[in-house]
């Protein structure tokens, strides 16, 4: 009796898999299969949370991989932002982390009170605009520039996992752009 139910259920299961696939979007024609790739970033000896990680093909290829680190500093990479993993090859890696802003005497923009925020914006303009604020990168700017980054990774077939220690918080001043 049980064998009959299994034989009836198997074709239905196969039909569902055929109709809906095993999940994920179909790869574009000619795109190599991405391989599981995780990158862990540490800063000051701890995982760096909420950092963007971009893997750029060293040979100028078209398949970049991106990810955002979780609370423990781990990023699951996705090729072209949607296919899990990274295509095999050599990559340069750049990192973007939340910057700190020193608002000086004006202090940070107020939240929750539109009138106070409008007054703050007027005070900013009267006192020289956004250029008066100092912005600091938490990670060394060498990790944010594809031409200068020392971070590289070779993705091979199979699982790929790498940890990059970004050292101590850099707090390097970066230019604030007016909008």
Image (cartoon, helix red, strand yellow):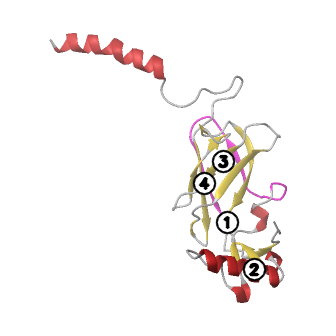
Query: Contact, CB < 8 Å: mark 3 with mark 4?
Result: yes
Q: What stretch is highlighted in magenta?
A: 146-166
Around disc 2, counting alpha carbons within 10 Å, would you say few (fewer than 14), some (14 to 19), or many (20 or more)? few
> 38 left or right of 99?
left
Around disc 4, counting alpha carbons within 10 Å, would you say few (fewer than 14), some (14 to 19), or many (20 or more)? many
Nearer to us: label 2 or label 4: 2
Nearer to us: label 2 or label 3: 2
Seen at 70% across and 76% down, the residue is: 101
Does residue 56 show up magenta in the picture? Answer: no
Q: State how far apart marks 3 and 4 are (Cα).
A: 7 Å
Q: Is residue 11 depicted above or below 32 in this figure?
A: above
Residue 8 found in image quarter: top left
Q: Is residue 71 depicted above or below 7 in this figure?
A: below
User: Which residue is situated farthest in the left direction here?
Assistant: 1
Residue 165 found in image quarter: bottom right
**Residue 66 shows which numbered tag?**
3
Seen at 72% across and 89% down, the residue is: 105
> Which badge, 4 or 1, comes first in the chain's sequence?
4
Asked if residue 163 shows in the view, the reply is yes
């Amino acid at each position: 009796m049980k064998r009959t139910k299994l034989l009836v259920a198997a074709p239905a299961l196969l039909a569902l898999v055929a109709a809906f696939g095993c999940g994920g979007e179909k790869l574009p024609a000619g795109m190599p299969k991405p391989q599981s790739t995780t990158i862990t970033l540490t800063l000051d000896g701890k995982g760096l949370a909420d950092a963007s990680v971009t893997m750029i093909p060293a040979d100028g290829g078209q398949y970049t991989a991106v990810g955002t680190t979780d609370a423990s500093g781990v990023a699951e990479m996705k090729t072209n932002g949607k296919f899990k993993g990274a295509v095999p090859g050599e990559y340069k890696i750049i990192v973007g982390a939340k910057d700190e802003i020193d608002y000086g005497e004006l202090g940070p923009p107020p939240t929750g009170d539109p009138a106070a925020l409008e007054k703050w914006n007027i005070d900013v303009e009267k006192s020289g605009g956004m250029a008066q604020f100092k912005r600091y990168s938490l990670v060394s700017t060498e990790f944010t520039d594809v031409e200068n980054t020392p971070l590289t990774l070779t993705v091979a077939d199979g699982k790929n996992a790498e940890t990059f220690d970004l050292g101590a918080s850099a707090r390097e001043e970066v230019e604030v752009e007016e909008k």
